[in-house]
Amino acid sequence: MTSPDTRAPADPRPPEPPDAAAAEPVVPLHRNRDFLLLWGGSAVSLLGSTATTIAYPLLVLALTGSPFAAGLAGFVALLPGLLLPLPAGALVDRWPRRRLMIWCDGLRALGAAAIAVAAALDLLGLPLVLAVGFVEGALTVFHGLAAHAAVPNVVPRGQLSLALSRNEARGRAAVMLGTPLGGALFGLGRAVPFLADAVSYLVSLIGLLFIRKEFEAERSDRRDGMGAQVREGLGWLWRQPFLRTTALLVAGSNLMFRALFLVAIVLAGDLGASSAGVGLMVGVAGGGGLLGSLAAPWFARRVGLGALVIGANWAWAVLMAVIALSRDPLSLAAAYAAMWFVGPLWNVAVGGYQLDITPDRLRGRVLAATSTLSSGALPIGSLLGGLLLDSAGARTAALALAGWMVLIAGAASLARSVRTTPGPPVR
């Protein structure tokens, strides 16, 4: 994880055609038509999918009464994040990214509609939930990699940090609004949140149809095999000590966060919160993430990457301990929201640095490599959360997660590639 020379090379990009956005006159981000279409369509689809994030465990618990089954459903839905990013990244760098996203939105709409119809007809069972969850998760891997890799081609390079902070704000606002919305829609009927999710994917699809810019720079005719393309992306990432180390740190913290999601739901219930209160708690956490997204450009300009990475991990460790020791839903919700505030500070600064120094022809594969570690930890965390709850209860599970986060924070503090990172590289 460390290297004798931890400084990134002065110009790690090989010669290649400039990003599409760099050759055009600079306009304010709020007047960039293509970015607004991409941002707005994704905002609507995120709102719908976030509503089902809370609806899925409620649905599985209603069908089976088993916290382990709820954890298993989360594991299966997130499993593509472990299995698919590397080949998906190679295909994202080969196929037209916008067309790929359109197909993903259409197929995800069909999957959500299938759950809604089965629930409305009282034909829904756990096998169908698991199957649709896996397919939707696989499509989300492709869609997410293509969308993230496209950002530098839709906005000028100097606005990259601001664009990423707006994307973070979009996701956090979706959690803040979508989670209580999902609980409310589930109260109207088991099919309702999934029907809304299907409609949201169609809105995203329509927005993509009206975007004019290409989502990739001009590509060469070179077509290596899939294995060679994957190795090229992995090799480039491995030669960046800071990015390599932070990818491993994210994997460790994401395992904790995904397990915490289910643990926090059960712990809040044990502390007396109603189903609506649980949805409100996660919505408040989304509000914390939204504030963090708005503050992220300020931190990216003023705080060195190494200090931010170390500080974020220790903040999560302390706040996880507060959650584990909480005696009422209010203190639990406040600590959970504070954890969500810190996340965007990391994502914008580290993510902006990565996009800035990664060549366009490699972006899908490098994002896939980091995603394999970060998203790959999510299904393990979901399964771990269910196992901890079944075997030890919510309080003990939360304490175990707090101990794990202390280990991750200690590793961040000791990593030389993090401690010696130069000042803020994000514009």
Image (cartoon, rainbow, N blue to C red):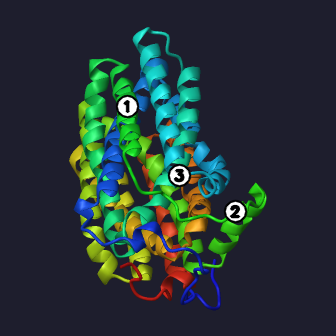
Q: Percent position (x, y) of residue 87?
A: 68, 52
Please determine whether, in this image, residue 310 is positioned above or below residue 351: below
The first of marks 1 and 3 along the sequence is: 3
* Picture residue at 37% right of the left edge, 24% below the top: 195
Near mark 3 (Cα within 10 A), the count class, few <14, some 14-19 or many ≥20, is many
Helix, strand or loop under label 1: helix
Amino acid at circle 3: Arg
Of residue 251 and residue 262, the one placed in the foreground of this image is 251
Task: Choose top left, top right, bottom left or bottom right for residue 196.
Answer: top left
Helix, strand or loop under label 3: helix
Q: If the image is split into quadrants, where does the C terminus sit? A: bottom left
**Number of callouts:** 3
Residue 386 visible? The answer is: no
Amino acid at circle 1: Asp
Q: Mark 3 points at which residue?
A: 97
Which label was assigned to residue 221? 2
